[in-house]
């Protein structure tokens, strides 16, 4: 989808994608997207993962957004939200689908939230001054992100929190864990990541055994890969902005 010019489409004040756009971005066939949806329909919630347009609502939407005329003849017209795109990426489970999904989250679905047009000159000047200050603060973060991308080493979450704090993002181990749980990357009341993010190459989980007086206990250790470090740092940076 990096080569696909995405015309922003909105429904009920949020960014959405058509089935055609989703298929092209994930480099698959429209029918495969449809089949995956039909096979797992009980997992999809209308209004959360998708919208199904019918009748006059569908025709009006197709006309307003200049969508291909063939869609006018369909009985139903589906639009996929950010959460719906995630479920389709899970169904396909390819590197291409996961890579495109990450890109969609950062540059399409949440792009609307990242910028507000100033309405007055004082507001514009204030935003410009704040932006200049943030650019200076984040120069070190850019260098850190580049270092993460070039590194092959995984780090403990407390080590990542320390490095992030030294580079302008004030956080500690507990606060970073809370943030990762808020993002649903790590299980609640646990230090173990969801398998989805292990599969995406963001975390590594190792297991070790320790002899106690009565038995042998198994311990799991979560480490953040270079790819995961870059992803987490970028999300922290965007939230702080």
Image (cartoon, rainbow, N blue to C red):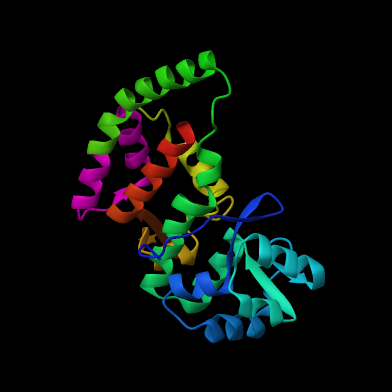
Closer to the camera in the image, 225 or 62: 62
Residue 178 sits above or below residue 240 on the image: below
Quadrant in which the N terminus appears:
bottom left
Q: Main secondary structure of the magenta part?
A: helix
Residue 19 sits above or below residue 131 on the image: below
Residue 122 in the image: state x and y as whole percent.
Answer: 52, 13
Closer to the camera in the image, 132 or 205: 132
Camera sees residue 96: yes
Residue 109 sits above or below residue 138 on the image: below
Q: Within the magenta stretch, is there residue 161?
A: yes
Q: Quadrant of residue 87?
A: bottom right
Residue at the (35%, 22%) spot, across then down: 132
Q: Quadrant of residue 140?
A: top left
- Residues in magenta, as a range: 144-167
Closer to the camera in the image, 100 or 212: 100
Residue at the (53%, 48%) spot, across then down: 110
Residue 14 sits above or below residue 89 on the image: above
Horizontal side of 60 relative to 36 (left or right) equals right
Q: Within the magenta stretch, is there residue 162?
A: yes
Residue at the (39%, 30%) spot, across then down: 169
Residue 84 in the image: state x and y as whole percent.
Answer: 60, 66
Quadrant in which the C terminus appears:
top left
Farthest residue in the top direction?
122
Camera sees residue 214: no
Residue at the (53%, 85%) spot, across then down: 32
Horizontal side of 164 relative to 214 (left or right) equals left
Residue 228 in the image: state x and y as whole percent.
Answer: 35, 53
């Amino acid at each position: 989808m990096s080569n696909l010019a995405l015309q922003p489409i909105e429904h009920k004040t949020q960014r959405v994608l058509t089935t055609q756009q989703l298929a092209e971005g994930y480099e698959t066939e429209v029918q495969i997207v449809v089949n995956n949806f039909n096979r797992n329909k009980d997992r999809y919630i209308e209004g959360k993962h998708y919208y199904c347009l019918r009748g006059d609502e569908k025709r009006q939407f197709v006309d307003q957004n200049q969508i291909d005329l063939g869609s006018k003849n369909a009985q139903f017209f589906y639009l996929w939200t950010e959460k719906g795109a995630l479920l389709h990426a899970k169904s396909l489970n390819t590197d291409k689908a996961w890579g495109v999904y990450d890109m969609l989250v950062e540059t399409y679905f949440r792009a609307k939230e990242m910028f507000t047009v100033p309405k007055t000159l004082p507001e514009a000047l204030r935003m410009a001054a704040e932006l200049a200050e943030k650019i200076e603060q984040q120069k070190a973060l850019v260098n850190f992100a580049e270092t993460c991308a070039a590194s092959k080493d995984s780090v403990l979450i407390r080590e990542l929190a320390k490095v992030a704090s030294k580079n302008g993002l004030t956080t500690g181990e507990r606060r970073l864990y809370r943030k990762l749980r808020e993002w649903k990357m790590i299980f609640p009341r646990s230090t173990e990541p969801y398998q989805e993010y292990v599969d995406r190459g963001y975390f590594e989980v190792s297991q070790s055994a320790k002899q106690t007086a009565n038995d042998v206990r198994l311990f799991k250790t979560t480490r953040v890969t270079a790819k995961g470090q870059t992803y987490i740092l970028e999300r922290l940076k965007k939230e702080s902005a």
